Amino acid sequence: MAQKHVSTTSDYIDWDAAMNLVRRLFKDGNYRMSLLVGCGCFFGLRFSDLSQLSWRQLLSGDTFELYEQKTGKRRVIRINKGFQAHIRECYVAMKIQDMDEPCFLNRFGGILTNQMVNRHFKALKVKYQIRIKNFSTHSLRKTFGRRVVDMAGPDSEMAIIKLSELFNHSNSMVTRRYLGLRQEELGEVYDSLQF
């Protein structure tokens, strides 16, 4: 349960900073975290779904299918060609023997937990000087959403409608709030005033 008057929301990472983090983690030999951050940013899945991914799902084709743990809904995820190469590099670097092994195991062979990863993220934020206030596993999903909206440019309303469906939100206003767009729009009201 959240503490009273304490914000528990996560923020998104600027796309270029997120991709830089993926590359730096790989370069530093932290292949699993590199893959996790990349998967979160490219797939837009909740951590509960990311943590269950296997190497076979990621390496057997251009898409994979899953049923979301939270909603039970079927999702088909398309894997970006450039990111697919990174997945293979991580697979080779980690010397994986079993394609059915989950991708995100801890050093004891269990699946990483949300709490473990959030602790790692706090350390990564400091080590790599990531400019983000609240960095958590959910930041990756929000980074995906913000990138989709930013890339849409003038068609951002259509992107928000598509994201609303992908995120399984009840309507596009929920998606706007979720991505922090609504707060930015409301802040612009104050900026529009003149003295």
Image: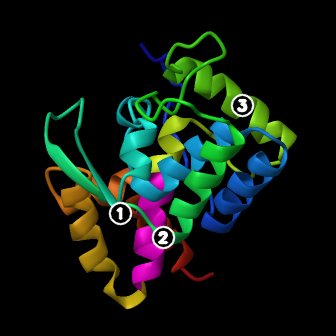
Q: What is the quadrant of residue 124 in the picture?
A: top right
Label ID, residue 62: 1
Amino acid under disc 2: Lys
Q: What is the quadrant of residue 122 in the picture?
A: top right
Given contact means CB atoms under 8 Å apart, are the residues at marks 2 and 3 in contact? no
Which quadrant of the rendered structure holds the C terminus?
bottom right
Residue 6: % across, % down: 54, 25
Residue ID for mark 2: 81
Residue 127: % across, % down: 86, 39
Q: Is residue 36 visible?
A: yes
What range of the chain is rendered magenta?
142-152
Residue at horizontal 41%, vertical 72%?
149
Amino acid under disc 1: Asp
Count all numbered tags in the image, as a single digit: 3
Residue 112: % across, % down: 53, 21
**Separation of disc 2 and disc 3 at Cα?**
30 Å
State whether residue 34 is above or below residue 158: above
